[in-house]
Image (cartoon, helix red, strand yellow):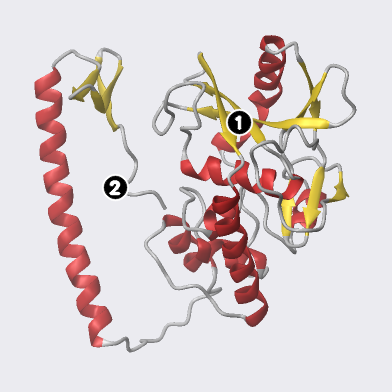
Amino acid sequence: MTDTARAGATTAPAGGPQLLGWFEPGSPEWHAARAAGIGGSEIAAVMGLSPYESRFSLWHRKKGLVAPVEESDVMYWGKLHEPTICAEFGKRHPEWQVRPAATYGRGFQIANPDRQLFSTTGSYPTALLEAKTSRDDEGWGEPGTGEIPVHYRAQCLWYLDVLGGGRCHVAVLIGLSDYREYVVEYDEAEARVLRDGGAEFMRTLAAGERPDIDGHTATYQTLRELPEGLDAVDVEIPTALRDRFHAAQDAAWDAEDELTACKGELLDWIGTGQRAVCERERVATRTVRDGRTYQLLPARTRRTAR
C-alpha cells in the first residue's frame, strides 16, 4: 500500500508480503496455501476470540489430525452475498475502484482480503474491504466506527499487518436488509499482540505441544473426531475428573431449569411484543410461526468472547 495509506500507522516488521496466488476461498489450493501459516480468519482462534473455532481445534487441523472445516450455511450464504455487498460498497464510493484480492504471505502470516481499494487514478491499493453478513446486529456498533465483532477486528488487523496498510473498510449486511459500513484503522500495538500470538502458536505446532482442552464447542467436536473405532473396554479415570464431571452435570441441569423459567417469564412479560429490552438494550427476540411463539432468541451468545 502507499505511504498515504500508512499515514498514522507504525510500519510493520521488515519484509514485504509475497504473492502466493489467486485461489477460490475454500478450494483445495486455498487450503494448501494456508496450511503452513495462519490466515486472517484463523488468528482469532489462535487468540481465543473466535466463536467458530478454538485454538485446540485449529491446532489439530494444522497438524492434519482432523479434516478442514466443512462449509456451514452461514459460510455458504456469506460467500454468496460477498459480491453483492462489495458491489454496493463500490456503488456508494465512486472515488474507489473495488478489485478482487489475491492471497499473500509474509512468513507464517497469510492474508487474503475480500477486496482491495484503488483510487480512480492510482496503480496501488490504498485500503482493504471486507464483506460480512450477520443475522442480527449483536456486536456491531454505530456505523462509521470501528465497533465490530472482535474476531472480525482481529482479521482486519491481520490483513493490514501483512499488507502494510492503514485502513480496512468493513461492509456488512445485517438481517438481509440493513447495510452498514465500518472502518478499522491499523494499530501497531494490537497487531504486534496478534503477531506474537501467532508466532507462539506456530512454535507449539512445530514442538507438538497440544493446547489445553477448553469449553469451546469446537474443541469438543474435535475430540469427538480424534478417536477412530470403539474398544469395548473400561478405562479408569482420575477421581477428580469424575467429581468435576458430576458437578458440571448438576450445575448444567440446575441452569437449564432456571433458564427455562426465565424464558417463560420473559414471554409472559412481553406478551405479543417482539423484543424484550432493558435500559434500551435488547435482551431477547421472540419469533412467531403459524401465529404462535416459535423461539425466544437471546441477544448475546456468550458471557465473554472466546
Disc 2 is placed on an element classified as loop
Q: Is residue 57 above or below residue 92?
A: below
Residue 186: x percent and y percent? 61, 41
Query: In 3D space, how far apart are the residues under numbered discs 1 and 2 (Cα atoms)?
Result: 25 Å
**Residue denoted by label 1:** 78
Query: What residue lies at 55% left-to-right and 35% top-to-bottom?
Result: 74
Question: Residue 276's image quarter?
Answer: top left
Give me the residue at 56% from left, 79% from top: 209
Q: Nearer the viewer, residue 243 or 213?
A: 213
Q: Earlier in the sequence, mark 1 or mark 2?
A: 1
Left or right of 260? Residue 302 is right
Q: Which mark is residue 39?
A: none
Q: Amino acid at mark 2?
A: Arg
Horizontal side of 247 relative to 125 (left or right) equals: left
In the rendering, at what x and y percent does residue 112 appear? 74, 43
Residue annotated with mark 2: 303
Report the mark closest to the observer, 1 or 2.
Answer: 2
Nearest the viewer among 66 and 111 is: 111
Q: Between residues 182 and 204, which one lies in front from this camera angle?
A: 182
Residue 178's place in the image compared with 6, above or below, is above
Q: Tell me whether the residue at label 1 lies in contact with that at label 2, contact meaning CB atoms closer than 8 angstroms.
A: no
Badge 1: how crowded within 10 Å, few (<14), some, or many (20+)?
some
